[in-house]
Amino acid sequence: MCDVLIVGGGAAGMMAAVAASSLGRKVTLLEKNEKLGKKIYITGKGRCNFTNASPIEEAQRAVVSNAKFLYSAFYAFSNEAVMDFFEQAGMPYQIERGNRVFPASGHASDVIRALERRMREQGVEIRLNCAVKELLLDDGIVCGVRLESGERIACANVILATGGCSYPLTGSTGDGYRLAKKAGHHVTPRRPALVPLVAEEPYITAMQGLSLKNVRLRLYRDKDRIYDGFGEMMFTHFGVTGPLVLTASSYAGRFLPGHLRASIDLKPALSEEKINERLLREFREHPKNRIKTVYRNLLPFKMTDVMIELTQTDPQKEVSGVTKAERQRMAAFLKDFPFTVTDSRGFSEAVVTQGGVDVREVDPSTMESKRVRGLYFAGELLDLDALTGGFNLQIAWSTGYLAGINIR
Ligand SMILES: Cc1cc2nc3c(=O)[nH]c(=O)nc-3n(C[C@H](O)[C@H](O)[C@H](O)COP(=O)(O)OP(=O)(O)OC[C@H]3O[C@@H](n4cnc5c(N)ncnc54)[C@H](O)[C@@H]3O)c2cc1C
């Protein structure tokens, strides 16, 4: 009989297996796929941004849900510890823009290989094609699991690391939520996060392919501002995407589907007054220019027709004939280019799942359930999620490690 059964051979499960076996515990890892770490392969566009080298306080700030819960885990197995671990496991790394850390080879597969090597060296039994169907409890205490095949495996400790429900093709189909619920845990509502957003207006999709750099995006629900950030975004055939939009989605998800007012500030470095002055100066210097030319000088090509339509100006009009009200409207739209967000693109395109096993029922210093003795949780299955930059994998490594070293 093993000391611990780990359900899920993703980032959190594999790190839990490494941690527990490093203390001499007998570990069995159960993964329902035919191979380990299927999701890791597609992280960081196949390069795996496996952590972030910024100070730990930064990581704490990048956590969107339940950052406080992670305090012990982030200190017990920090980003520095993660980098050291992979280096010692034979995988050199490199730090890139925004302190994002990648394998030096540029291959996500190296992350999986390093973990697999360590597990095999430390005697972890890895069982692939093993889907866990049921948690076996005896009087509120864990006593093993039942597989889909019907096989029962007895064990006094089980770590659930089955992931969330984003990109279900990788195996993260939400099994762990069902198992946790059956064991008496509450699961908070799950929604897609770090996900592209759907826009209502046809003029948004008409600009597909256009990418905007250094813009400010704000999202409002009625009068409440729910997001305000700077960065890069892109228009697509369904709406908007890009780093700025993915971040915004982590704050907007709880209000979707619905109707969120979105506003792009196309000139965040200039006040509306300054834009007005600039337009006035340009109109004086080139009175024969047409409105269309003014917009072409100010905006990306794909945006000019849309802007003309929205501001209801005559594109052929010479600027000498533009009224003060028209000029002010032009400046206002440059600062507040509007559209409506109605939904996200769902779990199939979400980088993470927001919501999950309620962390109030889990001990943050051991990852053990407060309800069921011998049951531990790790990774995205918990109600934890963070922004992009390597922070979500850091959550998986830290919680996996803490669960692994704390089994009884
Ligand atoms: C496209 C994409 C890119 C990403 N890029 C990054 C990035 O660059 N940096 C970053 O930090 N994060 C990134 N993430 C997020 C990150 O991959 C996840 O947060 C992380 O993998 C979660 O790890 P986990 O171990 O909790 O879950 P998972 O990696 O989902 O692993 C769960 C495992 O459990 C197995 N399983 C499920 N149910 C059962 C069952 N019943 N029995 C047995 N096994 C089961 C699954 O098959 C799976 O292998 C990305 C995510 C996506 C989708």
Image (cartoon, helix red, strand yellow):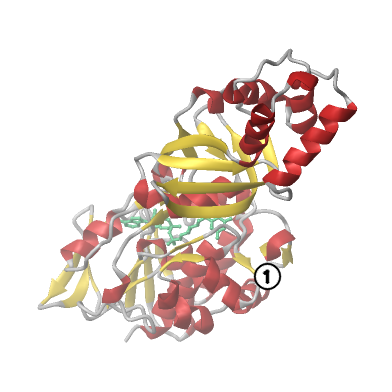
- Residue at (51, 33) in percent of width and height: 239
Q: Is residue 254 above or below residue 341?
A: below
Q: How many badges with numbers are in the image?
A: 1
Q: Position of residue 315 (x, y in %)?
A: 70, 16
User: Is 354 in front, or is 153?
Assistant: 354
Please provide percent x and percent y for residue 110.
Answer: 63, 59
| Residue in front for this viewpoint, 326 or 179 | 326
Q: Is residue 61 left or right of residue 186?
A: right
Q: Residue furthest left?
A: 139
Q: Specify the quadrant of the image occupied by residue 132.
A: bottom left
**Label 1 crowd bin: few (<14), some (14–19), many (20+), radius 10 Å:** some
Residue drawn 74% across and 27% down?
A: 295
What is the residue that sits farthest to the top in this orientation? 316
Q: Residue at x 62, y 35 (%)?
A: 333
- In the rendered structure, the answer to whether residue 155 lies left or right of residue 244 reads left
Camera-nearest residue between 385 and 208: 208
Q: In the rendered view of the protein, which quadrant contains the C terminus?
A: bottom left
The answer to whether residue 344 is seen in the rendering is yes
Q: Residue 182's spot in the image, x, y percent?
A: 16, 63
Amino acid beneath label 1? Gly
The answer to whether residue 318 is above or below residue 131 is: above
Q: Quadrant of ligand 1?
A: bottom left
Location of mark 1 (residue): 90
Q: Ligand 1 near label 1 (Cβ, under 8 Å)?
A: no
Residue 214 seen:
no
Q: Quadrant of the N terminus?
A: bottom left
* Left or right side of 192 for 152: left
